[in-house]
Image: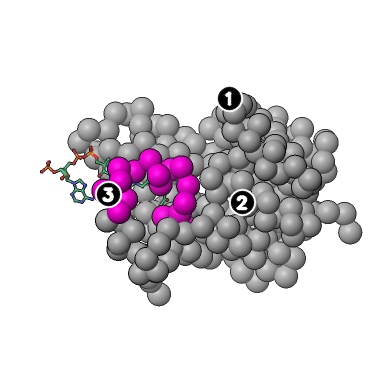
C-alpha cells in the first residue's frame, strides 16, 4: 500500500510540529500547511524535520479559496489526502468588555472557519475513496470556558459541534472525524500568558505540570491509525486532569 498522505494545518506551530513528526514516524507522508509569512519558523521547521517524509505547503486556513488551491496542489503532487489534522489556532485574549471586534473575527476565522475551509475541500476525495481520518484540535477551554477567551472558547466548542455533525455525515464512507482537546501545553501560545496567571493555572492541573506537545501528537497518531475506524464523533481530552467529565 502507498503511504497514507497526511495534511496538518498549523503544521509548523507548537503542537503542529510534533504532530507532523509523530505521523511521519508512523509511516505517513506529511504535508505541513501554514502561513508562508512565518519565514523564520519555516526554516526552523525544515531543520527539525530534516530526514523525515515531511514537506511544507503555504496556505492561509482563514481563506476558503487559498485552502482549495493548496488541497489541489497537494493532491496533484503527493496524492489523495487520507488524513487531515486541523491544528491551526490563534489566541487574542481579553475580557469581552475590552474585546475589539477584530479579536473576535481573527480567532473565529482561523480556529473555526479554518476547519470548515479545509474539510470542505478534502471531504469529497475521502468519501469517494472510502477512507479518511479527520482530527480537529479543540481545547479544554472550549469545554470549560476560560476568562478572557470568549472568542477562543466559542471557536473551540464550535469545532467539536462540527466534528460530531460531520462524523455522522461520513460515517458510512469509512471516514472518521474526532476532536482532541488539549489542556495547557509547553507551547509559545501558553508561554505568552502572564507568568503569575500561568503559574496559577499550572497549580490547578491535577498532574501538576504542562502537557508536552508529543503527548497531544500521540493521541492524534492513535486516532488516525488504520484500525481506529470505530472511533468517530468523539472528543479525547488530554489535559492532565484539568477538566474531568463523563
Ligand atoms: N478569573 C476571575 N477574575 C479575573 C481573572 C480570572 N481568571 N483574570 C482577571 N480577573 C479579574 C481582574 O482581576 C480584573 O478585576 P478588576 O476589574 O476588579 O481589577 C478583571 O477581572 C478584568 O481583568 P483584566 O482587566 O486584567 O482583563 P483583561 O481583559 O485584560 O484580560 C487576561 C485578562 C489577559 C485575559 C487574563 O485574564 C489572562 O491571561 N487569562 C488567561 C487566559 C488564558 O488562559 N489563555 C489561554 C491561552 S493558551 C490556550 O488557549 C491554549 C489552550 O487551548 C489551553
Which scheme is used to colour this image of the protein? Answer: one colour
Please tell me in which quadrant of the rendered image residue 51 appears: top right
Question: Mark 2 vs mark 3: which is more N-terminal?
Answer: 2
Q: Nearer the viewer, residue 69 or 54?
A: 54
The disc at residue 37 is 1
Mark yes or no: residue 194 visible: yes
Q: Which residues lie in the magenta part? A: 182-199
- Does residue 35 lie above or below 95 as drawn? above
Of the 4 image quadrants, the one containing the N terminus is bottom right
Please tell me in which quadrant of the rendered image residue 32 appears: top right
65 relative position to 210: left or right: right
- Do residues under tags 2 and 3 come within 8 Å of each other at their CB atoms? no
| Secondary-structure class at tag 3 | helix
117 relative position to 101: left or right: right
Where residue 147 appears, x then y in whole percent?
26, 48
Residue at 73%, 46% in the rendered image: 30
Residue at 68%, 51% in the rendered image: 21
Q: Nearer the viewer, residue 246 or 13?
A: 13
Q: Which residue is mark 3?
A: 197
Amino acid at each position: 500500500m502507498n503511504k497514507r498522505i497526511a495534511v496538518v494545518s498549523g503544521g509548523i506551530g507548537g503542537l503542529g510540529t510534533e504532530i507532523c513528526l509523530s505521523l511521519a514516524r508512523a509511516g505517513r507522508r506529511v504535508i505541513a500547511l501554514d502561513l508562508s509569512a512565518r519565514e523564520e519558523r519555516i526554516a526552523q521547521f525544515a531543520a527539525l524535520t530534516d530526514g523525515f517524509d515531511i514537506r511544507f505547503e503555504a496556505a492561509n486556513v482563514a481563506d476558503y479559496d487559498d485552502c482549495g488551491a493548496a488541497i489541489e496542489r497537494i493532491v496533484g503532487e503527493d496524492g489523495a489526502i487520507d488524513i487531515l489534522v486541523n491544528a491551526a489556532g490563534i489566541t487574542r485574549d481579553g475580557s469581552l468588555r475590552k474585546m475589539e471586534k477584530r479579536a473576535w473575527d481573527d480567532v473565529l476565522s482561523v480556529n473555526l472557519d479554518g476547519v470548515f475551509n479545509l474539510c470542505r475541500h478534502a471531504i469529497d476525495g475521502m468519501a469517494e475513496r472510502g477512507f479518511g481520518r479527520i482530527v480537529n484540535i479543540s481545547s479544554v477551554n472550549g469545554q470549560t470556558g476560560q476568562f478572557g477567551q470568549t472568542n477562543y472558547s466559542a471557536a473551540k466548542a464550535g469545532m467539536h459541534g462540527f466534528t460530531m455533525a460531520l462524523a455522522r455525515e461520513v460515517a458510512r464512507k469509512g471516514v472518521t472525524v474526532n476532536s482532541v482537546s488539549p489542556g495547557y501545553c509547553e507551547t509559545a501560545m501558553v508561554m505568552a500568558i502572564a507568568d503569575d496567571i500561568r503559574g496559577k493555572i499550572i497549580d490547578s492541573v491535577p498532574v501538576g505540570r504542562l502537557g508536552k506537545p508529543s503527548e497531544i501528537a500521540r493521541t492524534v497518531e492513535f486516532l488516525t491509525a488504520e484500525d481506529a475506524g470505530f472511533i468517530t464523533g468523539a472528543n479525547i481530552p488530554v489535559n492532565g486532569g484539568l477538566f474531568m467529565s463523563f
